[in-house]
Amino acid sequence: MQKQIIKITSIIVILSASFSFAQMKSQVGWMSKFGLAGGLTTAWMFPNYDEINKQLPKFGISEKLSGGLLTWGGSGYVYLMIVDDLRIGGMGFGGTQSLASVSSGFNREIKYGLSGGAFTLEYTLPFVKKIAISIGGMIGGGKLTVEQYQNNDNFSWQETWDEFNNPGNTENFSRRIESNYITLTPTINIDVPLTRFFAIRVGSGYQFTMSESWTIENDKSIESVPSSLNGDAFFIQTGIYLGFFAY
C-alpha cells in the first residue's frame, strides 16, 4: 500500500508543478504554444530481470537478460487551447527480448515482453522558445509477459493433438505467464520542430505499475510470483512527429 501511495504522489507532484507554471505564465504574459502532432516513437526501457535470470541456469540457458528493452509504438497529442500550453494525447508501445540455446538436445528459449497504452497529459513550459519542453504524466494499462519454450524442432499437425493423450511422452512444451497492471508514469519530453510540420522528440520517464494480477496459460491464476518481477522501468524515448507546430 505504501508503495502505491508513493507512485500516486509522484504523479500528483508532477501535475501540480505543471499547473503552477500555468498560473505563473498567466501573470507574466507569455505567449501560448499550440499545435497537434502524431507519429512513431521508440523507447529504451530498463526493467528488472533479476528473478528471471535466477532461473535461467536451471532452464539450460547460460546467458542472462540484461541492458535495455527496445519498444516500438505510436503517440500523438493536441493542445487544448482552453488551458494555455496544456496538451492531451495518447500512446501505445510494445517490445520483447529473448534468449535461446540448445540444452540436452532440446531447443530452449525464454522471451520477456512489455507492452501498454496510456492517456497523456503534459504542460509545455511557456518561457522556452522555438522548442517545446513538456512535463507531465501518463495513466493507462500495461502487460508483462514471460514465455518459456522447449522443443525438439520436429513438429507435425497430428502430433500437436496426440500429445495431449500422451503427456508423459511429449518433448515439446511451452508456458506463457503474464501480468496485467495499471501504469502511472511521470515524463519529461523535448520536441524540436525542424519545420512547421515536422519535429523530433527526445524524452524520458519512469513507469510505475500497480494492481498487478498474474495469470498462466488460459487465464488461470498463478501464485507466489516474486514482487520484484514487475513492469516498473525507467525509459528513454525518441520520436518522429508530423503535424503543426507553433512554438
Image (cartoon, helix red, strand yellow):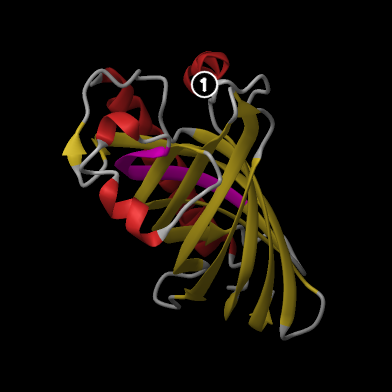
Residue appearing at x 39%, y 39% in the figure? 174
Q: Say which amino acid is labelled 1.
A: Phe
Q: Confirm whether residue 68 shows in the render.
A: yes
Most prominent secondary structure in the magenta stretch?
A: strand
Which residue occupies the foreground of this view, 71 or 132?
71
**Extent of the magenta region:** 172-188
**x, y (%) of residue 159?**
35, 52
Which residue occupies the foreground of this view, 12 or 48?
48
Q: Confirm whether residue 212 shows in the render.
A: no
Q: Image height check: is 110 above or below 6?
A: below
**x, y (%) of residue 30?**
62, 67
Q: Quadrant of the N terminus?
A: top left
Q: Image height check: is 8 above or below 157?
A: above
**x, y (%) of residue 40?**
63, 70
Which residue occupies the foreground of this view, 128 or 174?
174
Determine the image quadrant of residue 2: top left
Q: Image height check: is 10 above or below 35?
A: above
Q: Which residue is mark 1?
A: 59
**x, y (%) of residue 94?**
51, 55
Q: Residue furthest right?
A: 194
Residue appearing at x 80%, y 82% in the figure? 195
Which residue occupies the foreground of this view, 58 or 212?
58
Q: Is residue 245 left or right of residue 110?
A: right
Residue appearing at x 51%, y 58% in the figure? 93
Q: Is residue 28 left or right of residue 2?
A: right
